[in-house]
């Protein structure tokens, strides 16, 4: 069994700086006054080609448009995405049932939450991040509200690919510097 790697003091200091850098990277968020749509399965056209249904395409374009309007940047980091979907309370419900819904005691059951998440994250592909493979953590909540709305927050939780290269260089240099100092004392 191999012994675990123990970082040098210089490496720990460098790691602390990189962790602070991730925490200091600004989040992006936006609100889209849309009704959440579940991602539909791809269809096969008459010619045999696969295509995404129009309803899904339109929703994904709308999500991308709302993100662009918010003025947020495209991320290259590992990400956490938080999605809060508000579904409008049906007008036909009586006041006590509406109250239960507004207090979060009665929750929506229409639409498949994981397919709604997929439609939102696919809509943000190439707009909020290079690819949804960067998403390492998803937090999603679906509740009732007085209006339909989708609130999305994107938060970096790791380094960007460029920062990883810089961090590796910094850590190797810190390790080598400490080794030279240690050998110089002997």
Image (cartoon, rainbow, N blue to C red):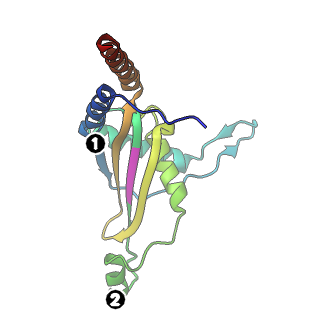
The x and y percentages for residue 108 are 45, 72
Location of the N terminus by quadrant is top right
Location of the C terminus by quadrant is top left
Which residue is the site of mark 2? 96
Q: Residue at x 40, y 41 (%)?
A: 79
Q: Residue at x 37, y 20 (%)?
A: 175
Q: Is residue 19 above or below residue 152?
A: above
**Which is more N-terminal, label 2 or label 1?**
1
Q: Secondary structure at mark 2?
A: helix
Left or right? Give the position of 15 relative to 60: left
Foreground mark, 1 or 2, reads 1
Q: Residue at x 42, y 65 (%)?
A: 142
Q: Give 153 or 44, whichever is nearer the viewer.
A: 153
Residue 74 within the segment the image draws in magenta:
no
Extent of the magenta region: 80-84
The x and y percentages for residue 31 are 30, 52
Which residue is the site of mark 1? 27
């Amino acid at each position: 069994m191999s012994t675990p790697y123990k970082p040098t003091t210089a490496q720990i200091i460098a790691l602390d700086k990189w962790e602070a850098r991730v925490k200091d990277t600004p989040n992006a968020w936006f609100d889209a006054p849309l009704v959440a749509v579940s991602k539909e399965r791809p269809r096969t056209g008459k010619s045999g080609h696969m295509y995404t249904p129009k309803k899904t395409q339109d929703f994904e374009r709308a999500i991308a448009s709302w993100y662009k309007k918010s003025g947020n940047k495209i991320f290259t980091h590992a990400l956490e995405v938080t999605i809060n979907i508000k579904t409008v309370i049906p007008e036909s419900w009586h006041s006590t049932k509406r109250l239960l819904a507004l207090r979060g005691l009665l929750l929506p059951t229409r639409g498949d939450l994981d397919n709604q998440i997929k439609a939102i994250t696919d809509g943000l592909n190439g707009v909020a991040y290079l690819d949804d493979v960067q998403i390492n953590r998803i937090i999603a909540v679906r509740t009732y509200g007085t209006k339909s709305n989708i609130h999305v927050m994107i938060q970096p939780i790791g380094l960007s690919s460029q920062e990883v290269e810089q961090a590796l260089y910094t850590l190797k240099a810190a390790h080598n510097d400490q080794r030279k100092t240690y050998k110089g004392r002997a």
